[in-house]
Image (spheres, helix red, strand yellow):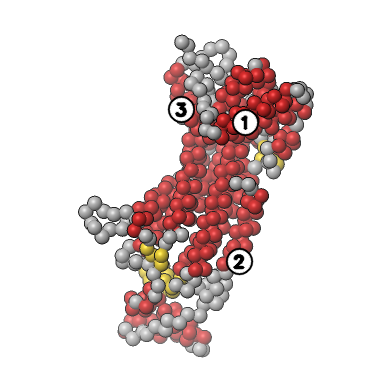
């Protein structure tokens, strides 16, 4: 039996099988991620086609009902791209045509596969960025909560990995919370780039049909559209790179946090600990409680930081218009969204169960943490700074320095004034474009 082939560009001949396998690659499997968005885009498109007379008022509800049935099958996990069917767009149109005959073939009027995949990718990326913003907000809230919980638990601060000045777990947790605000700033920028409707740009040069692009923009919930049809096609690549930069920013923050935790778990520090069942052991050393979760998180997040560069190189010298190279971005970006989501979720899980050590600074090895405090104390009493610095330095050199462990840090963002409410306000303002309070999920 001859295998059935269904392609939107079918002209009565088939390419060589080697050519097809090489050019399609893993794209059909990745396209399943786009199925719900392809149906969503098609429902908006046919609604618009009816408004301009390319579909009759009687045909529209029939098409919408069939598309709704396909969407329900996708939600149930029953949708698949059949053997011989090129992509998700072809599969949706094939299902409609089987059910509705020639009516199913009308849905492609006024659009190209180029703007069809573009709108799918915009909707997909927008949703994934929204999901990531929601997850990052949860991590932020946990960090703020733990910062407040441990605001009085002092720990050493380091520069060059040398004992430097007093810090606290409140300061440490709060630092990563505020760092996430910067990451969400990039996330919001990527979201704004994705939140633009390309539908109606067709193959990149518009259409002679009187398409109502304002209508599809409203129906799909886009904030605005890519007005210039060439600019709409040029946004492919830019949208993905912007998303990758935001992913890499969050990954950078998580990677540094993971490194800190790995170090603090080491017995030479022993600042933090986890329940035994959240650590792993050694095949020959019975005492080992390894931070494998944070080591894997560190590795995954370091790898994610290469994604923007990979996408930049892939798209660096492409000429204007659609080029098949762009297909390969899905191989890079789709797994990246999954991986950063897993890392954020795991950070929430682990940090919520982390215990911290009390009274760390009572250990004499941390006496020199208080040299700066002593210099400042003498300056406040009237000694010039350079003279106070010299006096304390000499005491350190001859072994007579006696630390005063009382701290008086009161300025904004310091140990004694973590400014958690102000940091939380920054995050609320930064998250505003995502309208999380209006999102049903």
Q: Crowding near pointer 1: few (<14 within 10 Å), some, many (20+)?
A: many
In this rendered view, identify the residue nearer to me: 270 or 195.
270
Q: Name the residue at 45% across, 55% down.
A: 349
Asked if one can make out residue 116 in the rendered structure from this viewpoint, the answer is no
Residue 277 location (% of width, % of height): 35, 55
Residue 315 — which label?
Answer: none
In this rendered view, identify the residue nearer to me: 328 or 176.
176
Instruction: In the displayed orientation, state which residue is furthest to the left.
Output: 284
Residue matched to label 3: 25
Report, in whole angstroms, how far the alpha carbon at label 1 lies from the one at label 2.
43 Å
Residue matched to label 2: 422
Q: Are marks 1 and 3 in contact (CB under 8 Å)?
A: no
Q: Earlier in the sequence, mark 1 or mark 2?
A: 1
Which element carries disc 2, helix, strand or loop?
helix
Residue matched to label 1: 39
In this view, 344 is above or below 390: above
Q: Name the residue at 56% across, 75% down.
A: 411
Residue 51 location (% of width, % of height): 77, 28
Residue 128 location (% of width, % of height): 56, 43
Which element carries disc 3, helix, strand or loop?
loop
Residue 143 location (% of width, % of height): 51, 61
Q: Name the residue at 62% across, 29% down.
A: 69
In this rendered view, identify the residue nearer to me: 21 or 42.
42
């Amino acid at each position: 039996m001859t295998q059935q082939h269904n392609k939107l560009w079918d002209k009565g001949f088939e390419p060589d099988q080697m050519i097809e396998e090489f050019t399609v690659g893993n794209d059909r499997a990745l396209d399943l991620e786009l199925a719900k968005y392809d149906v969503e885009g098609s429902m908006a498109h046919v609604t618009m086609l009816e408004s301009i007379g390319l579909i009759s008022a009687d045909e529209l509800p029939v098409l919408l009902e069939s598309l709704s049935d396909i969407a329900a099958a996708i939600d149930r996990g029953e949708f698949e791209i059949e053997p011989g069917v090129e992509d998700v767009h072809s599969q949706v149109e094939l299902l409609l045509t089987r059910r509705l005959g020639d009516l199913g073939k009308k849905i492609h009027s006024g659009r190209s596969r180029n703007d069809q995949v573009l709108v799918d990718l915009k909707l997909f990326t927008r949703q994934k960025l929204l999901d990531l913003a929601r997850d990052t907000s949860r991590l932020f809230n946990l960090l703020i909560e733990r910062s407040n919980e441990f605001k009085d638990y002092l720990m050493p601060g380091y520069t060059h990995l040398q004992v430097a000045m007093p810090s606290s777990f409140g300061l440490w947790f709060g630092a990563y919370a505020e760092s996430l605000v910067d990451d969400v700033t990039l996330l919001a920028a990527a979201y704004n780039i994705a939140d633009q409707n390309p539908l109606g740009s067709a193959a990149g040069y518009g259409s002679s049909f009187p398409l109502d692009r304002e209508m599809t923009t409203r129906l799909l919930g886009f904030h605005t559209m890519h007005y210039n049809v060439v600019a709409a096609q040029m946004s492919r690549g830019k949208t993905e790179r912007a998303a990758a930069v935001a992913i890499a920013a969050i990954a950078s923050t998580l990677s540094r946090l993971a490194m800190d935790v790995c170090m603090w778990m080491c017995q030479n520090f022993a600042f933090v600990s986890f329940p035994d069942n959240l650590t792993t052991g050694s095949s020959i050393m019975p005492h080992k409680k390894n931070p494998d979760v944070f080591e894997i998180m560190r590795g995954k997040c370091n790898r994610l930081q290469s994604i923007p560069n990979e996408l930049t190189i892939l798209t660096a010298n492409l000429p204007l218009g659609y080029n098949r190279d762009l297909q390969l971005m899905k191989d890079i970006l789709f797994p990246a969204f999954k991986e950063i989501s897993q890392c954020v979720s795991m950070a929430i899980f682990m940090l919520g169960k982390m215990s911290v050590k009390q009274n760390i600074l009572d250990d004499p090895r941390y006496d020199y943490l208080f040299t700066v405090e002593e210099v400042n104390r003498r300056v406040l009493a009237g000694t010039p700074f350079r003279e106070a610095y010299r006096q304390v330095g000499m005491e350190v050199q001859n072994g007579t320095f006696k630390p005063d462990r009382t701290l008086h840090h009161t300025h904004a963002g310091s140990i004694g004034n973590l400014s958690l409410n102000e940091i939380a306000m920054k995050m609320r303002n930064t998250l505003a474009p995502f309208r999380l309070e209006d999102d049903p999920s």
